Amino acid sequence: MRWLRQPSPLVHRRGGIEREPVPLRGCQEGCGHAASLPGVCDSGEKAGCSGPGLGRPWRRAARPTPVGACVVCAFCAHARHLPGWLLECADRPGHRGAPPAPPGVLQEAVTALDALGLQTHTHATGDGGVRLALDAIEAAARTNGTRDRRHGIVHVECLSPADLPRFAALGVVAAMQPRHCSPDLVAGTWMENVGQARWDRAWRLRSLAASGAHVALSSDWQVGEMDPLVGVYSAMTRAGLDGSAAWTPDERLTLEQALRGYTAEGAWAWHAEGDLGVLRVGAKADLVVWSDDLYAHAEDSAALLEQQAALTVVGGEVVHDVGSSGPGGGGAEPGVGHYGAVSHCSAHQTHGVPA
């Protein structure tokens, strides 16, 4: 069990921000990110992070984030031919990729962490990697007799039809990023690796939701824009931000489903559905008031990209108000609410890891 007692590329501890941030080697002075592994921030940034706002300390959340575990299972579809596939790569016959650790190691890790009462979040993109993660979670529950742990699998970019119902059956959260499926990001490497015959396995958001699985949505920034409305638009259209080249339309979500994915489903993933992700008496007052009624644009999803956060409340405290001249007020910078000509920061597009 030596690999569990020290950080490794496969398993590391992921602490919440209730601890004091640890300066990260290579980051700017006072970056504010808390490091779990040498060279890796909890925010997902790599050492040497830079850019607007990254040199400033973050605002501490109103309550600590639960301490969990992150199991890194590197089956990345945008890294050419690296993922674990059930079938050979369409553009490289005979090649299916390879797991990042010997057989059985992931299952042993998830079982051990599950026995400790920890939730795991396993990153898997190829359909073979997703199956490996599901098998590990299923084995952990069987060995430990645990129920309702709500382990998660992150990305789930390619999913075999045989594995789709297992998410609901095992209570596994599909933590997915709608922006990743935009054709302007995945045309080329991803589509060529998978091959058109398997495009119907790509980002099966609607199918997973229809199966009863919990689908929690996020940005995976910097791979996708941080603005949740970009993700909502992508989930609704499966198109580029200019509305072009929509694909796999059968997996589009409705506005209601997409908003639920960004709110209530994420809360469920953290066993916090009674406090977060909903508007009701007694829940935590974490909410955003948008510049317009989003439901008024349910049939005109492009208009969602023009909206901005007018008011943000965290833990009952107003932290952003466009109508205020104080901290967090004063309105957004020009162009912030419009993404028609955005310059992308996607690892899918650049065929590598974002700098």
Image: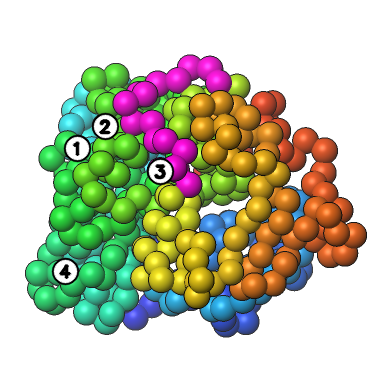
What residue would you read off at disc 3? 257
Q: Residue furthest front?
A: 281
Residue type at numbered disc 2:
Arg
Mark 3 vs mark 1: give the one in front.
3
SS assignment at label 4: helix
Q: Which residues are magenta?
A: 243-259
Horizontal side of 312 relative to 261 (left or right) equals: right
Horizontal side of 143 relative to 13 (left or right) equals: left
* N-terminal-most mark, 3 or 2: 2
Task: Name the residue rendered at 49%, 66% in the picture.
Answer: 280
Task: Name the residue rendered at 57%, 32% in the picture.
Answer: 297
What residue would you read off at disc 1? 160
Task: Name the residue rendered at 32%, 66% in the picture.
Answer: 120
* N-terminal-most mark, 3 or 4: 4
* N-terminal-most mark, 2 or 1: 1
* N-terminal-most mark, 4 or 1: 4
Mark 3 vs mark 4: give the one in front.
3
Horizontal side of 168 relative to 44 (left or right) equals: left
SS assignment at label 3: helix
* N-terminal-most mark, 3 or 1: 1
